Structure formats: structure tokens, C-alpha cells
Image (cartoon, rainbow, N blue to C red):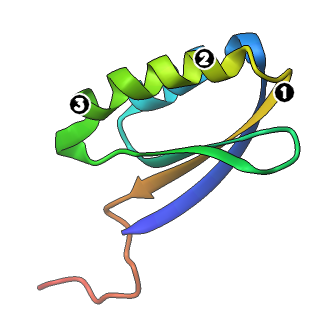
Amino acid sequence: MTVTQEEVKVRSAELTDKIKSVIHEGNVHRIIVKDSHGHTVMEIPLTVGLVAFITAPALIAVAGLGAAAAEWSVQIERVIQGELDGQLPKA
């Protein structure tokens, strides 16, 4: 299992839409929302079984954050499975 990180800058109006689209992609492990100064404002851990339970309140909070600042940074951690992680294939 490999975890990759991606960081995307978004404007306040695009914040909620970006979070929703990232969640729907399905291979996301965690989403971290940072303000324009680089301070972490919100972390959204996404485990497979809890996605529906966690996302509804998180999206409401993200919508409220969108009005607070002009620019946000969204850090996305993705889990990539199926790669050889230094392990030998099973025969």
C-alpha cells in the first residue's frame, strides 16, 4: 500500500465542490484543509466504512469555512493499492 499526497489551491467558492469531488473519487485516505497561511483548519479522515457518516457533517463545516477566507489549500492523501511495495509476489 502506498500513500501519495497532492495539494490543490482553491478559492472560497470552490472549496465545498472540491471536497465533494475528492470524496466521490473513493481512493482518498485523508483530506486536510489549510488556510492561506498554511495553518491546518480541518482534517477529514476517510475510512471506507465511515465515509457516509463522516462526510455530511464535514461538508457542512467546509461550507462554513468557505466564507471565512479567500484562498484555501486542500491536501489530499490517496491510498494506492496493488503496487509492489518492496514485497515479493506470491507464487
| Left or right: residue 65 compared with residue 87 | right
Q: Residue furthest left?
A: 91
Q: Secondary structure at mark 1?
A: strand
Residue picked out by circle 1: 71
Work out whether mark 3 precedes mark 1 in sequence or the reverse, and give the earlier one: 3
Residue type at mark 1 is Glu
Residue type at mark 3 is Phe
Work out whether mark 2 precedes mark 1 in sequence or the reverse, and give the earlier one: 2
Q: Secondary structure at mark 2?
A: helix
Distance from Cα at disc 2 to Cα at disc 3: 19 Å
Q: Residue furthest top?
A: 13
Point out residue 12 in the picture as x, y percentages from the top left corner. Answer: 76, 17
Between disc 2 and disc 3, the foreground one is: 2
Work out whether mark 2 precedes mark 3 in sequence or the reverse, and give the earlier one: 3
Determine whether 84 is above or below 47 in the image: below
Point out residue 16 in the picture as x, y percentages from the top left corner. Answer: 58, 17
Residue picked out by circle 2: 64
**Cβ–Cβ below 8 Å for labels 2 and 1?**
no
Q: Quadrant of the C terminus?
A: bottom left
38 or 89: which is nearer to us?
38
Residue picked out by circle 3: 53
Q: Residue at x 86, y 38 (%)?
A: 36
Q: Quadrant of the N terminus?
A: bottom left
**Cβ–Cβ below 8 Å for labels 3 and 1?**
no
| Left or right: residue 88 compared with residue 63 | left
Q: Residues within 10 Å of mark 1 (few under 14, many from 20)?
A: some
| Left or right: residue 70 compared with residue 18 | right
Q: Residue at x 43, y 28 (%)?
A: 58
42 or 48: which is nearer to us?
42
Residue type at mark 2 is Gly
Q: Residues within 10 Å of mark 2 (few under 14, many from 20)?
A: few
